Amino acid sequence: VSVGTTRWSGFLQDEWKPLSNLSINVGVRYDLDTNANDPDFSHPLVPNGRDRDTNNIQPRLGFSWDVTKSGQYVVRGGAGIFTGRYLLVPIFTELQQNGATGWLIRQRLNGLLLGLPALALDPANPRTTGIALPPDITLLDKTFDAPEATQASLGATARLGNTGLYFDVEGVYVKGRKEIMQRDANWSGNATHVRPNPAYNQINTYTNDGESVYKGLTFSVNGNLKGGHLITTSVTLASKKNRNDDFSPEFPVGYPSDSADPAAEYGRARSDERFRLVMTGIFRLPWQVTVSPIFEYGSGQPWTHRYGYDFNGDGKTGDRQPGVERFGEDGPPFRQLSLRVTKGVPLPFGKVDVFVEAYNVFNTVNYDVSTIDGGEFTAGPTLANPNAVAVRNSNFGKFVNTFPGREVQFGVRLSF
């Protein structure tokens, strides 16, 4: 039970073992959120409330097969439907910012965007300059269901001869549906760029228009070497695409380029990384010295090339030029070596470990792609004022922050 929500869950599961080396698990889960989409909410734009989401039946199947009954080769997999939980933030936001109760939010438009210098917005006097707009409100969509996903995985493990090493391969597929996406429902589209409901300016609406697809394939070698050494190495090839990354987008650049066309937002996810390599180990040397390196390499996460200003006049600055995809630019790669060296000293009553840890040993510069300035211009032509002069952004494509550089720390651990 959580605030404002009562959630009933049930799970039925059975295990079938027709052969000693094959295990099959079948389950069905059912979830019911009784109040999480605020079904009793009343508003001029939601006069009949909302229906509760009551059909969240989630069948699941998993298996594990020891091919030779010796543990040398194992194949495993599973598939199922999973329903996510409602989030309380959208409900609270609706109760606070619906325009009838709670806060009343109004914007004042800069007249320069319309070619009206006399109605320019003065940042020092925002309440008395510019063009007063109708109120902005936030609502849940009339139909607002819990998000869900279909997930499937298939993998295999093989022992490498008589060694302590194992080779793994794992494929994962996840298809997300009904994901929460916030967009301005009071926008006719960039082609006509008008407000269909003149009583309001923005009607920022939490909808189920979001969707995503993740595909990943991981190869790894893990296990023990003679002498007590341990190694773990993995390579992941992946692709993640979606329409939005967060139910509460980064303001104001994280909103759709055209709120009336959510399908155009489908593209690489913010966290999409096509290649990632991780190598770790624990190597035991003479004189009770242990060396533990960690090497990481990632091909880099993407960023979005934007106009840099409100091109369509919808009050947000996530606008992209025609043909430019969301997160369509490759970000810089990430590479880092970290190292831990430990020296054990036996004592009559126990042991002392003296260690030094160094993160990013070579002080490699890794840029934080989330801090890039993706706006090519600071001002320029708009749909309402196509003759405005474009002003280029001198910081376009530059990063504000990097990830931490070299860090070294020392420590002592006493065991007894």
Image (cartoon, helix red, strand yellow):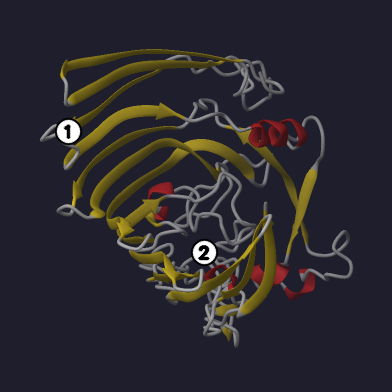
Q: Is residue 238 visible?
A: no
Can you give x and y, in whole percent of width and height, for residue 186 in the image? 57, 43
| Circle 1: element type | strand
Badge 1 amino acid = Asp
| Above/below status of 109 relative to 24 | below
Point 67% across, 47% down: residue: 201
64 and 372: which is toward the camera = 64
Q: Which residue is mark 2?
A: 319
Q: Which residue is mark 1?
A: 66
| Circle 2: element type | loop
Can you give x and y, in whole percent of width and height, for residue 3 in the image? 72, 23
Point 17% across, 33% down: residue: 66
- Cβ–Cβ below 8 Å for labels 2 and 1? no
Badge 2 amino acid = Asp
Extreme residue in the left direction: 68
Point 52% across, 73% down: residue: 339
